[in-house]
Amino acid sequence: MTDVAATALEAFRTELERLQRDAATVLAAAVDEAAIEAARIEFAGARSGRLKAAQKLLGGLDPAAKPEGGRLFNEAKAAVAALLEVAQERVGSAEESLPPVDVTLPGEILPRGHMHPITRTIRQVQEIMGRLGFESVDGPEVEDQWHNFEALAISPEHPARDPLDNFYLSVAQAADPLLLRSQTSTVQIRVMESREPPLRIVSLGRVYRPDTADATHYPMFHQVEGLLIEPGTTMAHLKSVLRLFASSFLGGDVHVRFRPSFFPFTEPSVEVDMEWGGRWVEMGGAGMVDPAVLAAVGYDPDVVTGFAFGLGVERIAARRYGVDDIRDFYRNDVRFLRQF
């Protein structure tokens, strides 16, 4: 046998020894049938196994070295087979030692979540107003001066535009500073700018005002804002819609009363109280849409009239569920939320 043939045979022997060591390491770490099967494919696979690759090397040996190479290959193949058998017996005996599973036992009941009471209230309001013919719409929470103030007839000197009463996102003295919307009336302006009357819409969403948090106020809260624009609309229509909504949401015979008030974007303006269970509760503001607002969006105040109302979602939710402090809705106390 030449020196070259002897060197090739020694390299073949080294490769087979490495293969056996690797197989022993991998199979010793296998803990289930899937791991053993993966090891079998890696080392003894008929197409791409490492033994198959070694067999191809055997074909390239010198004819004088092939008998010895064949003997070494067969020994390696037998060693890998033995390692696989030992691993399979070990895993099989471990699985047999596991206690039997009683399939008749009841399964473990996993805790299930549910909708937050505010989300549930919003969806109930949308469903009730939908039955009254109002389309649910939405708009951005970051607004400009036009949609949040000017189109709603809130003049530059009005105190509602004071930096201390809003969350401005840029310098309040800038030409057109952006802010977090302080009311969902902004959505009404956007819809009226893009559509012609008649309109029946309701918008629900988050609004922001720097109020001190207490039992009835919060810096972030939700509003439901309704708008109806049709020829011949009166305050009687407004009161009827609010009473139908209150009766559907709170249940029973709910009375609604109006108290004179002032809002720049409605004329006349009223505060809305609802009586339920022998108690009057202030729920929000309402009124007939000011002609200046109609003109600002391109409507003819001599042809169409309309009403608008805004109610606090937290307030009607608190009334519906008997909650005394709206801050409880945001404390993330599971013991409180689990009640709903």
Image: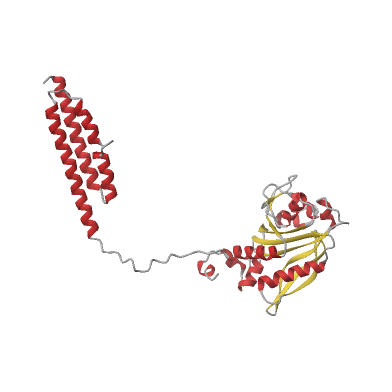
* Residue 215 showing in the rendered view: no
User: In this figure, what is the number of numbered marks?
Assistant: 0
Would you identify the image quadrant in which residue 68 lies?
A: top left
Residue 198 visible in the shown view: yes
312 or 212, which lies in front?
312
Task: Judge from the rendering whether residue 147 lies leftward or rightward of residue 316; answer left or right.
Answer: right
Q: Position of residue 28 (x, y in %)?
A: 22, 47
Name of the residue lying farthest toward the right: 302
197 w.r.t. 52: above or below:
below
The residue shown at (22%, 35%) is 51
Quarter of the figure with the C terminus: bottom right
Q: Where is residue 137? Give x, y as percent.
A: 69, 56
- Front residue of 135/189: it is 135
Please tell me which residue is depicted at 28% across the width and 44% down the height of the picture.
Answer: 38
Judge from the rendering whether residue 145 lies leftward or rightward of residue 141; answer left or right: right
Looking at the image, residue 293 sits to the left or right of residue 123; the answer is right
| x, y percent for residue 65 | 13, 25
**Above or below, comparing residue 314 to residue 14 in the picture:** below
Taking depth in this image into account, of 13 and 183 the one nearest to the observer is 13
Residue depicted at 51% across the width and 69% down the height: 335
Residue closest to the far front: 46
Residue 197 screen position, x and y as percent: 80, 55
Q: Quadrant of the N terminus?
A: top left
Residue at image location 27% in from the left, 41% down from the top = 41
Q: Pick whichever, 277 or 244, lies toward us.
A: 244
Q: How is the image coloured?
A: secondary structure
